[in-house]
Image (cartoon, helix red, strand yellow):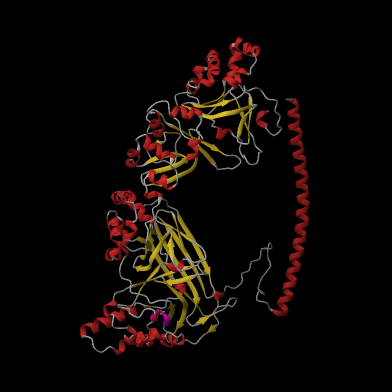
Amino acid sequence: MMSRFCFLLFFVLLLLVADDIECRRQRRHRHRFGRRLNDGLRGLRRQVRRWNHRWRFPWADINFAFNYGGSSRSRDWWDGPNVCTDEVRKNETTSDDVTSHHMTTTVTCDDKTTSYICTKSTTTNGKKTTLKEVKECCHGYSRTSGQYGCPTYRQLQDIVKTAESMNLTEFLRVARSVGLESKLQDSSGANFTVFAPTNEAFKQTPNLYPTFENIILSDMNSVIRISPSESTLLVSDASDLVLGHVAGGILTTTRLEDEQTITSANSKSSTIRVNFYDMVDDGIMTANCKRISSRDNLATNGVIYVVEDVLQPVTKSLMDIISSNPQLSYLKTAIGRTDLGLSLRSNGQFTLFAPTDNAFKKLDGGLLQRILSDQRCLKKILFHHLLPNVVCSSAVSDKHKSRTKNRLSNYLRLSRDQNNKYFVENSQIVDRDVMATNGVLHLIDDVILPDEALDILHALQKRNITKLPELIVQAGLKKSFETADNITVLVPTDEAFSKMTAFAEKRLNESETALADALRYHVIPTTTTCRAYDKLPTWNPKRNLTVHRDFMFPYHGFVRETIQCATILKSNIQSCNGIIHIIDKVLVPPVGTVVDVLEVDNRFTEFVRLLKNSGLADQLQGKGPFTVLAPTNEALKEVSENDMKELESRKEHLQSFIKDHIIQGHHCCSQIKRFGDRFNIFPRRLRSVSGMKLIVEESRDQLSVGTADVTECDMVGTNGVVHAINEVLQEEDYYDPFDFSFW
């Protein structure tokens, strides 16, 4: 003991001396470094002054005043000439509840070549105010990177002449046919934003109105033999089509935001939804999911965007489109049985992957009937197909797979193959980019079933977990699991069943009802993540589950959880009627206390005899928890006859021997193994109730405590756990100078 104390004292003194030497060295280094830094800065300032005097570099106004109290600011380009400023204020209510009296403010700024945009959001008492300040080159002016202000002026023309210079001849011809060209040339002060399709887009869409299949829009001026009512309707529809590409005002990209909807100039007030996808192909912009190939083409009275397809007027909501499509009758019925229809009729920004009737018919008849009859599962299926944002097909690259979150907060994988076929998960998109006022709809040829929409048994089958469902059917509990609601099931892996200990197998087969009781022991009658509890009720009314948490040092914050000594491998798998936790062991209902566990196992008859003779059996029947390292009968036979007689000759000796094999607390094998298994650095050290020091080590998956190997783990009782060992535990002569808890 004295030698260890002297070693510790010497070690502490050595650390103090080393620390003092290091502090002195760092002080000398800082002094020399500070002197050199000041000399270097003075030399740098002199050199910059010489450069400025000779050539006047753009950084001539920079003042190197690091620690000298000076301040300087380089010129911001938006403070220069020909920069116009605009502010937009928006008020909205985020919540009706007053959760605090604090005010939160966020400011984000984006500096681009021709614009500087700062957005300031202030939230207080559930009310949010957003102030967007835009500083950009005034209309007709431009700049290049590095220029102060916007010094370059470009002579602009009206929209018609600008479109002619861009070779948008088909759009101009259609606009001329409905009398729009003169308005686009009007210089009376009206400004327009035009989304003009390319000439190729018009050629690919010859019959724009199926009501007049014999009338082609490009030949409108040559149509002479139609009735007055049809003529009026045709001109009106054609005018609405063209005006559906035009909006009032000058809306450059600096004024537009992702998911912004613009009301067009046609009589139906159809909308144009703008989206930006900055992560796709170096950034793309779409209008009603049609890719924009050219942006911000300025004219004297507006701006032109070139779109790669004709924009059809958008006037219907997603629910209106579903109701009017004969291919979506099953989907319409499904939505009608939930409250989702109201959301799909309201304003929003949704993407709906809509399974066709054929997709629903592919499902198993029983599964389809159950889905349509169970509102909870049905709503989860619909939410799995619904995104909270608009995702156009243009945003899907053929170079890599993309993913996006749905309303269930699950990720859906989107992909496009070399044949330009689009897929969501493994379901093909058969009709894409059907625009609605509140989003976009894509028709798919399969129903995408998430775990959340399946009952627990179907969810297990989907994950190729077969043993537990087989036993549930064998025990006659299938109907109970299918009709149960809001339950939590602890599911052992198939491997866990194949590796059951002899103790567990014996318990499962000891009576006709043992299997059903064991399966009920895996079911918690409420949905829980387990972390909030220490004791959990089960479907087996006689037995509760015990949750243990192991805080892992040195991995701060990492918690390893076990339930009845079974480690949770994967938690919180959602299903339609509950939650699934995957565990690595089969749970066996305890027969009683740790003493009862020892008594029912014939391997521990000698240890039980010694326990009772010591008078400690009653204490081990108490609340605990206790961990018993129980030597088997074979292990006790290795004790010599003389040692056993001496041990039993005095009660205090026998009690000390029993206490050597008892540890206070509930320690499963997974918990008493050393931390950092891969590094073999920190073996775990425990103390028995008698004070004996026990070193826990693991080698090739073999757990040892002291000189004894653990031959069977985790025989759980109501007040602790029993582990079988193959030798009697004895005091070890183990010295570790860094194990201060042993001193």
Q: Position of residue 612 (x, y in %)?
A: 52, 15
Give left or right: position of 547 versus 2: left
Q: Quadrant of the N terminus?
A: top right
Magenta stretch secondary structure, dominant: helix
Nearer the observer, 395 or 519: 519
Count of numbered labels shown in the rendering:
0
In the rendered view, tell whether residue 154 sits above or below residue 327: below
- Can residue 318 be seen in this snapshot? yes
Give left or right: position of 405 versus 672: left
Dividing the picture into quadrants, the one containing residue 426 is bottom left
Give left or right: position of 422 versus 56: left
In the rendered view, tell whether residue 293 sits above or below residue 698: below
Q: Residue furthest top?
A: 649
In the rendered view, tell whether residue 260 sits above or below residue 669: below
Dividing the picture into quadrants, the one containing residue 523 is top left
Q: Quadrant of the C terminus?
A: top right
Dividing the picture into quadrants, the one containing residue 429 is bottom left
Residue 519 covered by magenta stretch: no
Q: Position of residue 628 (x, y in %)?
A: 55, 24
Nearer the observer, 1 or 38: 1
Give left or right: position of 3 versus 621: right
- Can residue 524 be seen in this snapshot? no
Q: Position of residue 469 (x, y in %)?
A: 40, 40
Residue at image point 40% right, 66% down: 90
Q: Which residues are magenta?
A: 197-202
Q: Position of residue 175 (x, y in %)?
A: 35, 85
Residue at image point 37% right, 50% down: 453
Residue 198 covered by magenta stretch: yes
